[in-house]
Image (tube, coloured by chain):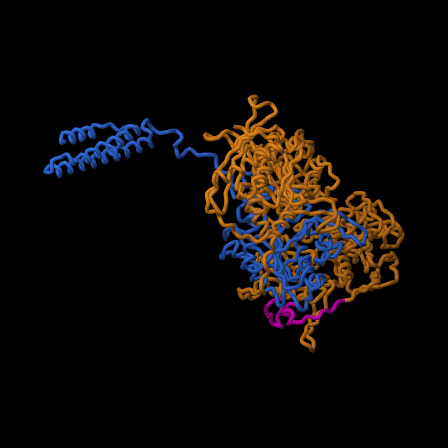
Chain colours: A orange, B blue
């Protein structure tokens, strides 16, 4: 929201500098995000007349204009959508420097240039480029009576201002206008604050709550959605331009001046925060204003000439039965003020915030008016704002008020009283702010504090502060105006006995540590996947978002594969040769539901390998990752958590599944060609995904670890080579050997695999190295031989394995 | 006899000991127990008694000589073997580097999150968890966001399920980790002192400044006599531990539906002249309505809550100018951390 400091000073007499004002406002909760200085001497800027407009041959959005500068006609390439022949415009001529700087802070110097091949001698300016406003929707169109070649400063007058951009929080509708911001500044500084008085022309007019005005009657059909509606009829006005000082202020905050009537409604909205609307009275042909909604969807053309489908149930202002405005959002084209308007109806009303917001959202149409209504407009200020607007119209356009002013108010506002206990305030804030300071702050904010016999403070909450509804809100008001930075702090904190960290935290840290120990790089990937990818998964259990703004981030990931494969392809395209990574994240599927009903959300761990395990070096050949590498890493990961003994592995055609009992813990697989081609991945990739929720259960149930004594006796090594049929797996043989050998076998691994014609086409030779150890003695030949012979006998029986010499 | 010792002396002098074999045969011939010097000594009986002393001295001298010759030659030979005489062996070049071992690093967001956690663990906080796919009640309603309130516009929300059925609730991707505060307070009794780190979502387009998700760490402290002053102290301790003791900060009022009073903390970033205030966290006293919704009596208990974006802090600390770098998983980026 933009606040002009010139304008602000109409309501507060302040001695503070611009920077001090910005700082004070920020520290009271109206965060000033930017301060922009406006105004300049306008050297080198002249009034020009656009004499010819032609399309740029090489750019759709550009036009080539011939502009008469009085002394000469120059060609200017212009990008504004609203440029047209016959307009009088502000031209920055070659050699001049604009009052505003370029985004990088350098001066904006106008040079002769070639734009897409066409010469351009100067620039036709928008308001923001001249530093007189913040509008950049198009070039500034000047009064048609101006002579080409006139100095712009003569046509426009010198004007300087500073504009604050305030990031307004949604709880502060009172500060959505200049007087409201001035009130906050007053609360901090105590400098004199006043709202504009009502001129004699309106202060004594008759106001009626029921009877009809001779020109119009007003009826509210839906009192829930519109609790107050003020209408003022003005006749015999002549619509012209508003005074220059008004136009300057409106421009400063980025509004385009239109005519004195529309400008007056905008002016009062930004002065008092009450949105207003002016109807052409002659277009209210039925003589009756009805505030009502329709049970069906309505087609309605708003002021911006757009025909909109307005949902059933939305509140309208109607001329009898015919809608002429969407309540609180935008007026209709059919009742718009034009140059011939001589009678108007000024509307000032209170519309329900929730309803206004709903309609505005459904229409995707947020206006300055809806912005204020949906935050809550002051129900006590409806009449005052209408009278203030009428007074300005009378002053700027002449005419007269046709009495009575109608103030239809079916549900009068009941002001709230809230009791503030100073002891409570001290407890929450953590310091005693002196009672007199508290009273002063509350008074300046308009809460009319009264100290009662019990020592508590009774506040009456004004209508412009709908956000203040209980004691805690008053405590915040005191604290924020006192300034949080002034609250004394002790530099100490105190707390009761801290809780233990949950097991899960230690588990996740160990998981991360194990992964990095295994040389895996941690990845972070998007949880939302593209539509094009999830269709490949062909799953019924996917969880899509209902309203994603992009199809590329629209479905929650059912596993962690996508992130790894995308990253692998990304890195291979950037000359990486091998990827070795892990990621921890939540995955989502439809199901019973663990946290929320109907959806399973689980923590998962991905271990991924792709491309080269080793690059060619002087001491090693290039080597690609294999599925065995992945299984090895997965097992090492389990071992690092000391869980290897409770996890078994099963090899299926598609993947390797790790289980604890019957519970699946992890699955390792080779990435399919279909997936590889989706990611345009030309190297092999291997993924293991581990269910961390299940693994945590296993980890948490693990017995407390105590060390095993190391055997004092040496181990004995023994190798055997076996000839078996090719389909026998090494893993199965190993399992059998362990079973046959019993607890004296301390280690086993395959050290050689061989196949070739010499041993037969269907055969392979596989050689195991075993180490035997006993805790009570040194094993001798007489101990080993029976073991080995049992092993070979069992292998022969189960696998028809032949011992090789 | 003395001729014999002289001859042996000469032989020892002339012996060529340039290889292991020559060395070994020299050892056998002169030094070993069956060697010639021992043999000489055994013949001392046949020497005239008056000559025995001289003979003994000569033989001992021979023995020393043989040992000296042997050890010198051995040392020389070993030295030569290391250098390999003919020059330097190509593979012995110590600057010839093998492929570096695989090196796993934590993602900068994990590192930053750990840094934040470590501070709060020191300050006596524990840690709590909750779902990313959350219901409307925990994400909004219990946090004092009225339905159809503009405060909901502060966060663009991904909806997963919309329902008109009163018995069910809309489902959303959580827009903040605050719902974990609600779950924590509903599931046990005060005092609460816990942080809630996690992933949150905003339905925004992906640009250098915004991503459709990010990470937060929120914290909650509820007990008797918890005050705004103590919140400020806690936050100051936090920023000093993360950004250093000289950090310049300011605290200004703000608005969150679930805290009252609410505040934001800025730190001064950059030098005196070109620096600016950067918002780094939001906080406030837990709103009495939130405590009530969780069955905590706000007349007895009060509390504070705070929240910060992990990305924001990581980007400040490491000078990262584009949030997308954090999700591209570009190894050239990640392996710098």
- Identity of the residue drawn at 55% across and 66% down: A488
- Which residue in the rendered view is the most extreme toward the top? A757
Residue A24, how many percent across, how many down?
59, 60
Query: Per the image, is A424 magenta?
Result: yes
Instruction: Indicate yes or no whether the magenta region holds residue A413.
Output: no
Nearer the observer, A755 or B126: A755
Q: Which residues are magenta?
A: A415-443
Residue A82 location (% of width, % of height):
71, 39
Residue situated furthest bottom in the rendering:
A453
From the viewer's side, name the closer residue of A155 and A159: A159
Is A54 placed above or below B113 here?
above
**A80 to A7, vertically: above or below:** above
Q: Which percent across, then down, holds residue B224?
A: 63, 67
Q: Quadrant of residue A653?
A: top right
Q: Please name whichever residue, A510 or A407, is drawn nearer the observer in this view of the structure.
A: A510
Answer above or below: position of A787 versus A217.
above
Q: Can residue A737 be seen in this snapshot?
A: yes
| Tally of numbered discs | 0
Residue placed most toward the observer, A29 or B307: B307
Residue A138 visible, this angle: no
- Could you tell me which residue is drawn at 59 percent across and 30 percent down? A801
Q: Position of residue A505 (x, y in %)?
A: 59, 52
């Amino acid at each position: 929201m933009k606040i002009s400091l010139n304008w602000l000073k109409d309501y507060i007499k302040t001695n503070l500098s611009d920077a001090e004002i910005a700082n004070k406002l920020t520290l009271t909760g109206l965060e000033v995000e930017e301060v922009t200085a406006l105004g300049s001497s306008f050297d080198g800027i002249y009034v020009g007349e656009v004499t010819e407009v032609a399309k740029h041959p090489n750019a759709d959005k550009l036009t080539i204009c011939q502009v008469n500068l009085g002394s000469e006609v120059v060609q200017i390439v212009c990008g504004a959508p609203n440029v047209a022949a016959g307009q009088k415009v502000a031209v920055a001529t070659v050699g001049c420097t604009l009052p505003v700087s370029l985004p990088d802070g350098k001066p904006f110097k106008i040079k002769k240039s070639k734009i897409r091949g066409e010469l351009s001698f100067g620039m036709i300016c928008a308001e923001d480029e001249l530093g007189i406003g913040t509008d950049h929707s198009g070039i500034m169109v000047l009064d048609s009576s101006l002579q080409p070649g006139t100095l712009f400063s003569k046509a426009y007058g010198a004007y300087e201002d500073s504009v604050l951009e305030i990031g307004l929080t949604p709880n502060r509708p009172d500060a959505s206008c200049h007087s409201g911001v001035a009130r906050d500044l007053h609360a901090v500084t105590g400098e004199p604050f006043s709202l504009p008085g009502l001129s004699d022309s309106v202060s004594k007019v008759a106001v009626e709550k029921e009877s009809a005005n001779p020109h119009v009657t007003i009826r509210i059909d839906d009192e829930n959605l519109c609790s107050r509606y003020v209408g003022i009829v003005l006749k015999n006005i002549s619509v012209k331009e508003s005074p220059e000082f008004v136009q300057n202020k409106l421009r400063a905050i980025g509004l385009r001046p239109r005519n004195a009537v529309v400008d007056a409604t905008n002016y009062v909205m930004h002065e008092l925060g009450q949105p207003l609307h002016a109807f052409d009275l002659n277009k209210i042909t039925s003589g009756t204003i009805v505030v009502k909604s329709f049970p069906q969807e309505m087609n309605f053309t708003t002021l911006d000439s757009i025909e909109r489908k307005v949902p059933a149930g939305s509140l309208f202002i109607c001329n009898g039965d015919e809608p002429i405005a969407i309540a609180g959002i935008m007026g209709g084209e059919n009742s718009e003020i034009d140059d011939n308007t001589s009678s108007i109806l000024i509307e000032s009303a209170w519309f329900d915030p929730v309803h206004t917001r709903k309609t505005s959202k459904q229409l995707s149409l947020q206006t300055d008016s809806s912005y204020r209504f949906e935050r809550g407009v002051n129900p006590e200020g409806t009449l005052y704002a209408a009278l203030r607007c009428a007074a300005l119209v009378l002053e700027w356009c002449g005419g007269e008020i046709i009495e009575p002013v109608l103030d239809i108010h079916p549900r009068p506002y009941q002001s709230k009283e809230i009791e503030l206990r100073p002891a409570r305030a001290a407890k929450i804030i953590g310091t005693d702010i002196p009672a007199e300071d508290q009273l002063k702050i509350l008074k300046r904010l308009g809460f009319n504090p009264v100290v009662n016999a019990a020592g508590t403070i009774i506040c009456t909450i004004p209508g412009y502060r709908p956000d203040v509804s209980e004691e805690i809100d008053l405590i915040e008001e005191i604290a924020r105006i006192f300034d949080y930075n002034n609250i004394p702090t002790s530099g100490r904190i105190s707390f009761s006995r801290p809780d233990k960290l949950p097991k899960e935290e230690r588990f996740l840290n160990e998981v991360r540590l194990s992964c990095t120990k295994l040389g895996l790089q941690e990845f972070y990937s998007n949880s939302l996947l593209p539509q094009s990818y999830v269709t490949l998964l062909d799953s019924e259990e996917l969880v899509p978002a209902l309203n994603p703004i992009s199809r590329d981030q629209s479905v929650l990931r059912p596993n962690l594969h996508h992130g790894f494969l995308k990253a692998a392809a990304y890195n291979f395209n950037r000359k990486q040769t091998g990827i070795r990574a892990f990621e921890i994240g939540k995955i989502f599927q439809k199901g019973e539901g663990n946290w929320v009903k109907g959806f399973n959300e689980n923590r998962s761990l991905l271990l991924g390998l792709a491309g080269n395990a080793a690059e060619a070096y002087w001491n090693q050949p290039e080597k690609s990752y294999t599925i065995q590498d992945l299984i090895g890493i997965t097992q090492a990961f389990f071992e690092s958590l000391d869980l290897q003994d409770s996890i078994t592995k099963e090899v299926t055609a598609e993947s390797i599944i790790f289980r604890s009992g019957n519970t699946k813990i992890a699955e390792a697989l080779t990435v399919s060609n279909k997936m590889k081609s989706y990611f345009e991945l030309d190297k092999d990739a291997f993924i293991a995904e581990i269910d961390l929720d299940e693994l945590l259960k296993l980890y948490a149930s693990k017995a407390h670890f105590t060390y095993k004594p190391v055997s004092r006796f040496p181990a004995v090594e023994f190798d055997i080579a076996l000839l078996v049929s090719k389909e026998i797996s090494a893993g199965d043989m190993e399992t059998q050997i362990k079973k046959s050998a019993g607890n004296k076998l301390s280690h086993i691994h395959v050290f050689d695999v061989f196949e070739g014609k010499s041993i037969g086409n269907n055969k392979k030779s596989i050689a195991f190295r075993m180490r035997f150890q006993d805790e009570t003695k040194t094993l001798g030949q007489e101990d080993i031989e029976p073991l080995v012979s049992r092993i070979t006998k069992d292998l022969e029986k189960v696998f028809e394995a032949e011992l090789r010499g | 006899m003395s001729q014999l010792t002289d001859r042996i002396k000469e032989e020892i002098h002339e012996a060529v000991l340039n290889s292991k074999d020559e060395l070994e045969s020299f050892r056998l011939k002169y030094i070993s127990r069956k060697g010639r010097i021992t043999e000489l000594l055994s013949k001392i009986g046949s020497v005239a008694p008056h000559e025995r002393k001289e003979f003994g001295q000569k033989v001992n001298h021979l023995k020393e000589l043989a040992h000296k010759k042997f050890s010198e030659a051995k040392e020389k030979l070993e030295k030569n073997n290391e250098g390999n005489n003919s020059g330097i062996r190509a593979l012995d070049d110590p600057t010839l580097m093998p492929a570096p071992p695989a090196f796993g690093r934590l993602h900068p967001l994990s590192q930053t999150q750990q840094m934040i956690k470590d501070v709060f663990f020191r300050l006596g906080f524990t840690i709590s968890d909750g779902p990313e796919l959350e219901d409307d009640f925990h994400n909004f309603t219990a946090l004092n966001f009225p339905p159809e309130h503009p405060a909901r516009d502060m966060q663009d929300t991904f909806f997963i399920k919309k329902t008109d059925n009163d018995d069910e609730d809309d489902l959303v991707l959580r827009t903040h980790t605050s719902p974990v505060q609600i779950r924590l307070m509903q599931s046990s009794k005060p005092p609460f002192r816990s942080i809630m780190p996690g992933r949150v979502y905003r339905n925004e387009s992906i640009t250098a400044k915004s991503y459709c998700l990010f990470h937060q760490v929120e914290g909650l402290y509820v007990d008797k006599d918890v005050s705004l002053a103590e919140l400020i102290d806690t936050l100051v301790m936090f920023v000093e531990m993360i950004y250093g003791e000289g950090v310049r900060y300011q605290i200004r009022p703000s608005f969150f539906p679930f805290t009252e009073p609410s505040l934001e903390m800025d730190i001064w970033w950059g030098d005196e002249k070109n620096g600016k205030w950067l918002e780094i966290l939001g906080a406030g006293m837990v709103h009495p309505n939130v405590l009530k919704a969780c069955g905590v009596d706000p007349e007895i208990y009060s509390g504070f809550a705070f929240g910060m974006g992990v990305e924001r802090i990581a980007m400040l600390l490491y000078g990262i100018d584009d949030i997308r770098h954090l999700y591209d998983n570009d190894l050239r980026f990640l392996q710098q951390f």
